[in-house]
Image (spheres, rainbow, N blue to C red):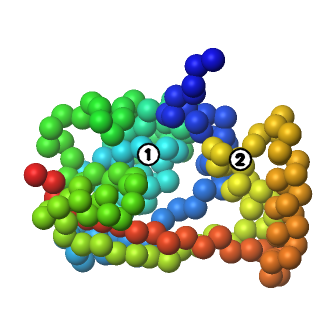
Amino acid sequence: MRAPDATERFSDRVADYVRYRPDYPHALLDWLRDGLGLTPAWRVADIGAGTGISAKMFLDAGHAVTAVEPNAAMRGAAVAWLGGNPRFRAVDGRADATGLPAASVDLVAERYADDDTMRAWFGAGLRGVARFKHYQRLDFDGLQGRLLSSSYAPKSHHPNHAPMLQALRELFDATAVDGKVSMDYDTRIFAGELE
C-alpha cells in the first residue's frame, strides 16, 4: 500500500477546514507595517496557502496575493472563496518549487517547524520576532468542526471516531462557559531577509 502524499492529507477535510479554522490576529499586520515597513504595494506569496485564510488577511489589507498550494481541493476552496478578487491568484506549487519567477514578490509567508529552526534559517537576516494571542469562541458544533478539520482526527468510519466525539462532549460540558469554550492560540511570527 502506498503511503499518502502529505500534500493530500486535508483533501477530505476541506469543508470543515473552511468553516472552522481560525483567522490570524490583525495585530500581526500592524507589526509588519511598523517593524518592516509593509505597505499595500508589497506583493505577497502565501506558501502553503491552504484554503486562503492568511491570503484573505493580506487581500483585505490591499495586497496582491499569490496563493501557492499543492493540494488541489484546498486550492480550489481558496479560489472559490477569494477568486473574485482581481488581486488574488492561486498556483499549484510547493515551498521548494513555487513556480514563481525570481523577485516577483516582496513578502513570503511560510509555515515553520520551531523557533530555533527559524532563527537559524534567517541567520543574520532576522529582523524581528513577535507573539500574538488569538482565540476562537466555539459552541459544541464549532469545537467538533474544528477538531474534524484536523488531519489526525479519526473520520466517521474509524473505530476511534465515536469515542473521540464522546470525550470531546464530556470535555466541552465540563469546561464551557455560557455554552462556549475558548480555543486559545499563540501566533508567532519571524520576519527577516534571506540572502
Residue sitting at the far top: 1
- Does label 2 or label 1 sit earlier along the sequence? 1
Say above or below: 33 vs 12: below
Mark 2, Cα crowd under 10 Å, few <14 / some 14-19 / many 20+, is some
Say above or below: 38 vs 11: below
Q: Front-most of 102 and 86?
A: 102
- Along the horizontal axis of the image, is 36 left or right of 95? left
**Quadrant location, the N terminus:** top right
> Type of residue at label 2?
Ala
* Label at residue 153: 2
- Name the residue rendered at 74%, 74% in the picture: 181
Say above or below: 11 vs 109: above
Under circle 1, the secondary element is: loop
Evaluate whether residue 135 shows in this view: yes
Percent position of residue 116, x then y: 32, 63
How many numbered tags mark residues here? 2
Evaluate whether residue 62 shows in this view: no
- Residue at mark 1: 49
- Name the residue rendered at 39%, 30% in the picture: 92
- Name the residue rendered at 82%, 70% in the picture: 172
Cα–Cα span, label 2 and label 1? 21 Å
Mark 1, Cα crowd under 10 Å, few <14 / some 14-19 / many 20+, is many
* Label at residue 162: none
Say above or below: 81 vs 76: below
Residue sitting at the far bottom: 177
Q: Front-most of 135 and 78?
A: 135
Q: Quadrant of residue 157?
A: top right
Under circle 2, the secondary element is: loop
Percent position of residue 98, x then y: 30, 34
Percent position of residue 108, x then y: 28, 51
Q: Nearer the viewer, mark 2 or mark 1?
A: 2
> Type of residue at label 1?
Ala
